[in-house]
């Protein structure tokens, strides 16, 4: 399940009901109520006749709040963070059926003009189930453009993190002339320099050992909470998994979960297809996902389980804690990520996270770049 929405006090509830008419006696709305009112006004207060509502049901929003206009993608992303699932479904249905706001889900021309960015990608992922096939094909191109941008940034970070930990070139006392290591030979024989004759006597020649660095095989199992509040994390986890997939000696798994577990490992090489296969929403059963991952582990001490979630568990938390304790006891590293977007905002159930730490897990908030560095350190 997603993080519980904050409760509004009675005054804010009345402000939402009364709109601008209540500001005189009730004062200024709190930040949460302000954002909710803005989102509702964007939809239901968009025309003079109340959007077809009966006079007694119209929202008198006016311009009192002074909020800047929302775009369709911004509005979609806002309502998914402000309202419960049932309300979101009603708002999206009213937007499409009552007001004909179909710019994102039905209008190819708008998608063709759209500037690819992460916010628009999030909106597409939240509404892709409403798209007709022609629009979905265009949306796929938009998703691909944003993913390419993210991949370029992430690939650089992963490469820097892993390349910085390579072993130095090995040398030996014997070898073919073609492998003669002049610099290392010079360094080792400087003490044999004859100042009188001005000559360097080479007593310990060195030759390069032509061997490729072979990493000990590792399994990295990324478990991603696909509830609606975790959309940024799902995006960055997909891109991170795709980058890890290209590294030698690493077997990457990507597993999405809500109340069910979906193994997306077959799509890790194609993050676009992966994202379009994710089904956002639903509850959260982290324990079930961790139990599934445990069954995939081949060599416990060569496995890292990364749990990307807000840790608001929908089933018995003790099941999750038990799985984590069993994994760490067998030598598997368990990392809990409270966030995986660029901001890495640490919004999560701290009590359950604390219990996981007691069971042997590492829990924190990391950006994708920081995760790459952490994995490079563990895998090195």
Image (cartoon, rainbow, N blue to C red):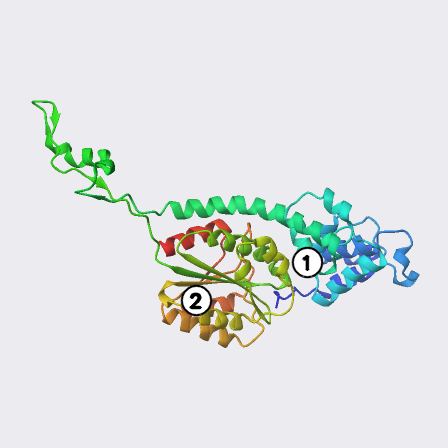
Residue 156: image x %, image y %? 48, 44
Which residue is at a point 49% across and 76% down the rendered structure image? 319
Tell me, yes or no, whether the two marked residues, 1 and 2, touch with CB atoms within 8 Å: no
Residue 213 seen in render: yes
Reply above or below: 184 against 309: above
Residue 197: image x %, image y %? 8, 22
Secondary structure, mark 1, is helix
Reply above or below: 2 against 214: below
Total marks shown come to: 2
Looking at the image, which residue sits at the far left? Answer: 196
Determine which quarter of the picture holds residue 186. Answer: top left
Which residue is at a point 57% across and 57% down the rendered structure image? 233
Q: Which residue is mark 2?
A: 357
Residue 58: image x %, image y %? 88, 59
Secondary structure, mark 2, is helix
Q: Which mark is residue 126?
A: 1
Q: CA distance from mark 1 to mark 2?
A: 32 Å
Q: Earlier in the sequence, mark 1 or mark 2?
A: 1
Q: Does residue 185 appear to the left or right of 283 in the view shown? A: left
Which residue is at a point 31% across and 47% down the rendered structure image? 167
Q: Does residue 283 appear to the left or right of 72 in the view shown? A: left
């Amino acid at each position: 399940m997603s993080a519980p929405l904050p409760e509004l006090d009675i005054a804010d509830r009345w402000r939402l009901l009364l709109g601008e008419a209540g500001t005189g006696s009730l004062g200024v709305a709190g930040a949460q109520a302000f954002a909710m009112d803005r989102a509702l006004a964007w939809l239901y207060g968009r025309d003079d006749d109340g959007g077809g509502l009966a006079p007694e049901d119209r929202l008198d929003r006016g311009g009192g709040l002074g909020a800047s206009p929302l775009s369709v993608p911004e509005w979609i992303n806002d309502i998914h963070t402000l309202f419960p699932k049932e309300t979101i479904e009603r708002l999206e249905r009213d937007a499409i059926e009552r007001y004909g706001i179909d710019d994102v889900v039905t209008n190819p021309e708008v998608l063709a003009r759209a500037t690819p960015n992460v916010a628009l990608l999030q909106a597409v992922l939240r509404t892709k189930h409403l798209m007709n096939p022609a629009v979905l094909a265009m949306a796929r191109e938009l998703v691909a453009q944003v993913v390419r941008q993210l991949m370029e940034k992430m690939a650089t970070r992963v490469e820097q993190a892993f390349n910085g930990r390579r072993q130095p070139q090995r040398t030996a006392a014997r070898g073919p002339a073609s492998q003669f290591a002049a610099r290392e030979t010079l360094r080792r024989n400087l003490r044999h320099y004859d100042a009188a004759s001005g000559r360097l006597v080479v007593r310990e020649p060195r030759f390069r050992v032509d061997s490729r660095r072979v990493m000990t095989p590792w399994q990295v199992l990324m478990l991603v909470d696909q509830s609606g509040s975790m959309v940024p994390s799902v995006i960055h986890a997909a891109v991170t998994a795709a980058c890890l997939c290209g590294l030698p000696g690493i077997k990457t798994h990507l597993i999405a979960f809500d109340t069910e577990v979906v193994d997306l490992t077959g799509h890790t090489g194609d993050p676009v297809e992966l994202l379009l296969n994710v089904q956002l929403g639903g509850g959260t059963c982290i324990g079930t996902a961790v139990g599934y991952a445990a069954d995939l582990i081949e060599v416990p001490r060569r496995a890292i389980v990364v749990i990307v979630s807000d840790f608001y568990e929908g089933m018995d938390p003790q099941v999750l804690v038990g799985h984590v304790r069993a994994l760490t006891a067998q030598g598997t590293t368990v990392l809990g990520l409270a966030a995986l977007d660029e901001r890495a905002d640490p919004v999560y159930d701290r009590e359950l996270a604390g219990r996981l730490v007691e069971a042997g897990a590492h829990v924190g908030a990391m950006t994708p770049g920081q995760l790459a560095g952490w994995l490079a350190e563990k895998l090195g």
